[in-house]
C-alpha cells in the first residue's frame, strides 16, 4: 500500500515537473511507464508473491467495527432486488421494502416545497436574468425567491459551488443560531456551530477528539445506533456501561426505549455528567418527530450548562453541531479537524439555515409549509401506531409505543427450536429471523443484535417510513410470515 502511494505521489511529481518544463508529452509517457515498471520490488514482480494488502495486514480496528443497518441482511436484499429485476416472479414477492434505515425520501416522502424552491431559486440566482423572468416568478413563491437572494448575499462571491468557511458560512450560522435561540429561549453563539455532512462526520470527529486508547470508554444507552459502536471501534475506544453507578442507571434506565425525554430525565443525566466530569454527546436529530401531544422536544442545550455537544439534523442531510462549554483551546482543536475536511457542502448548509428559519405567518409559503410538515408528521404517527398494534398482536412479540423518531424496536421471543436452528446456521437468532423474513416477504429489517440488547433477548428494528398506502401490505406479509415461522419452530 505504501509503495502504491509512493508511486502515485512520484508520478504526480513527475507530471508537474514535466509540464512545468514544457517537455514533449510522449517523453513523459515513456518516463512514467519506465518508472512504474522498473520500480516494482522484486517480490511483487513474481506471480507467486503475496498481495501487498490482505485481510491480515489492514487496520484491525476496521475489521472490528460493524454497521448493522447496512450489513449482511441489506446486502442480501440488494442481491434479491437484482434477481427480481433480471427475472420478475423469481421470488414470492414483487419488490424489496427497505425498512432498515431512516431514509424517508428514498421511500417516497416528498420534500418540503419551500426548501426546494429556495434551492432552485439559488441556482437561478447565479444567472440573474433567469430569475428575473416572469416565468420564474410564476414558478416560485415570492418569499422563496426573496430568501434565495438573502442567502446569496451571505455567501462570499455568491458561489454556491465553492468551498466555504470550515464551520460553515457565517451568515448561515447566524441564522441557525437565531433559530436555536428562538427555540430554546437561551442565547446561541454562531461560533460554537459546526455544520457537517450528516451525523456521521460529527460523531467521528468527536470520537477522534475524545478517544485516546481502549481505556477511554463511551457510555451509551441500549439499544444504541450502530454508528456509535462502529465509530468507537474505529477509533479504538470501549463501548458499554463500564461504570456501575446507581445514579446513572436510575437516571438513564427510564430512557432505554424510544421515547421523548422529560426535562427531569435530562437534568438527572446532566447532573450525573457534571458530578463525574463526563462530556455529554446529545444526538437530537429527530426534533420535529414527536407523536405524543402532551410531550415536546427539549434540547440538552436548553438551560443545562455542561461540557458537551448537541447534534441536530435537518431532513437527514446536514447536521448542526454545537459545542457547549468547551474550553477555547479545545474548540481550536475541533476547528482544526473541521479544516482538514475543508467544509460541508453548501447546499446542506443552506438547508440547515432554512429549517431553523422556515416561513413565518404572513409569508406566501407559510400555509403550504405548515400543511406539508404537519401532514408528514401526522402520517408518520399513524404509520407507527398501525405497525405497533400489528406487532403487539403477534405471538411472542412485544413492541413499545413510539413517542417519536422513525423506528420501532420490537422484542421477539423465539422458540428454542428456532434458536438452535440459528446456532446451526452460525448466526444470531434475531439475524436468522430477519433473514427468513426477507426471503419470504421482501421486507428488510435490522437484527437487534447490531444495536446491543440484554443478553438472551432478541429484537429487530423496523422503520415506519414506507408510504402509508403500503403499510397494510407490510402488516399482512409480516403477520403471515410470523405465524408460519412460529408454527415451523414451535414444537
Image: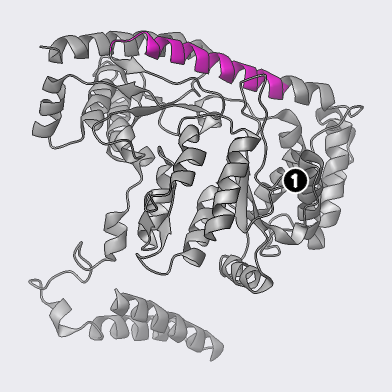
What's drawn in magenta, residue-wise? Answer: 372-395
Find residue 364 and report its horizontal and vertical position in percent. Answer: 88, 27
Q: Mark 1 points at which residue?
A: 353
Question: In the displayed structure, would residue 482 be above or below residue 47?
Answer: above
Give 443 or 149, whichever is nearer the viewer: 443
Residue appearing at x 67%, y 37% in the figure: 298
Give 42 or 300, whichever is nearer the viewer: 300
Give 299 or 243, whichever is nearer the viewer: 243
Give the quadrant of the C terminus: top left
Relative placement, left or right, of 181 versus 364 is: left
Relative placement, left or right, of 471 versus 233 is: right
Residue appearing at x 55%, y 30% in the figure: 405
Q: Is residue 248 magenta?
A: no
Question: In the displayed structure, would residue 366 be above or below residue 278?
Answer: above
Relative placement, left or right, of 46 versus 462 is: left
* Residue 462, image quadrant: top left
Q: Residue 366: in sight, yes or no?
A: yes
Residue appearing at x 63%, y 44% in the figure: 312
Q: Does the magenta stretch include residue 387?
A: yes
Q: Residue 124: in sight, yes or no?
A: no
* Residue 234, image quadrant: bottom left
- Total marks in image: 1
Find residue 459 and report its horizontal and vertical position in percent. Answer: 32, 28
Residue appearing at x 27%, y 39% in the figure: 72
Relative placement, left or right, of 220 versus 317 is: left
Amino acid at each position: 500500500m505504501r509503495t502504491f502511494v509512493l508511486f502515485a505521489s512520484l508520478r504526480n511529481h513527475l507530471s508537474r515537473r514535466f509540464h512545468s518544463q514544457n517537455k514533449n508529452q510522449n517523453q513523459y509517457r515513456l518516463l512514467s511507464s519506465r518508472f512504474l515498471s522498473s520500480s516494482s520490488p522484486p517480490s511483487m514482480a513474481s506471480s507467486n508473491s503475496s498481495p501487498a494488502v490482505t485481510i491480515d495486514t489492514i487496520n484491525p480496528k476496521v475489521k472490528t467495527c460493524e454497521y448493522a443497518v447496512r450489513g449482511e441482511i441489506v446486502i442480501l436484499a440488494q442481491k434479491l432486488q437484482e434477481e427480481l429485476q433480471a427475472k420478475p416472479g423469481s421470488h414470492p414477492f414483487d419488490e424489496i421494502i427497505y425498512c432498515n434505515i431512516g431514509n424517508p425520501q428514498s421511500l417516497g416522502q416528498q420534500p418540503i416545497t419551500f426548501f426546494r424552491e429556495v434551492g432552485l431559486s439559488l441556482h437561478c440566482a447565479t444567472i440573474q436574468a433567469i430569475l428575473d423572468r416572469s416565468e420564474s416568478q410564476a414558478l416560485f413563491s415570492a418569499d422563496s425567491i426573496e430568501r434565495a437572494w438573502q442567502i446569496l448575499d451571505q455567501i462570499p462571491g455568491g458561489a454556491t459551488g465553492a468551498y466555504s468557511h470550515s464551520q460553515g458560512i457565517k451568515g448561515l450560522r447566524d441564522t441557525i443560531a437565531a433559530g436555536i435561540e428562538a427555540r430554546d429561549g437561551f442565547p446561541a453563539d454562531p461560533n460554537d456551530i459546526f455544520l457537517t455532512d450528516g451525523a456521521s462526520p460529527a460523531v467521528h470527529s468527536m470520537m477522534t477528539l475524545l478517544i485516546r486508547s481502549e481505556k477511554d470508554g463511551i457510555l451509551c444507552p441500549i439499544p444504541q445506533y450502530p454508528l456509535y459502536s462502529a465509530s468507537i471501534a474505529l477509533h479504538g475506544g470501549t463501548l458499554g456501561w463500564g461504570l456501575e453507578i446507581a445514579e446513572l442507571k436510575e437516571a438513564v434506565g427510564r430512557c432505554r426505549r424510544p421515547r421523548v425525554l422529560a426535562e427531569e430525565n435530562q437534568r438527572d443525566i446532566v447532573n450525573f455528567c457534571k458530578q463525574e466530569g463526563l462530556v455529554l454527546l446529545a444526538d437530537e436529530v429527530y426534533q420535529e418527530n414527536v407523536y405524543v401531544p402532551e410531550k415536546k422536544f427539549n434540547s440538552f442545550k436548553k438551560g443545562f450548562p455542561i461540557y458537551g455537544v448537541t447534534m441536530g439534523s435537518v431532513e437527514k442531510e446536514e447536521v448542526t453541531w454545537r459545542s457547549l462549554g468547551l474550553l477555547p483551546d479545545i474548540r481550536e482543536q475541533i476547528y482544526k479537524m473541521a479544516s482538514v475536511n475543508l467544509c460541508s457542502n453548501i447546499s446542506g448548509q443552506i438547508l440547515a439555515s432554512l429549517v431553523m428559519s422556515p416561513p413565518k405567518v404572513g409569508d406566501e409559503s407559510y400555509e403550504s409549509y405548515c400543511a406539508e410538515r404537519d401532514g408528514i408528521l401526522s402520517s408518520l404517527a399513524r404509520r407507527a401506531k398501525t405497525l405497533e398494534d400489528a406487532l403487539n398482536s403477534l405471538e411472542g412479540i412485544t413492541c413499545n409505543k413510539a413517542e417519536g423518531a422513525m423506528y420501532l424496536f420490537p422484542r421477539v421471543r423465539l422458540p428454542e427450536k428456532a434458536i438452535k436452528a440459528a446456532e446451526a446456521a452460525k448466526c444470531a437468532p434475531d439475524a436468522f429471523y430477519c433473514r427468513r423474513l426477507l426471503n419470504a416477504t421482501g421486507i428488510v429489517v435490522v437484527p437487534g443484535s447490531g444495536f446491543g440488547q440484554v443478553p438472551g433477548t432478541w429484537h429487530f428494528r423496523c422503520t415506519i417510513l414506507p408510504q402509508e398506502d403500503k403499510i397494510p401490505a407490510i402488516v399482512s406479509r409480516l403477520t403471515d410470515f410470523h405465524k408460519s415461522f412460529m408454527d415451523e419452530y414451535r414444537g
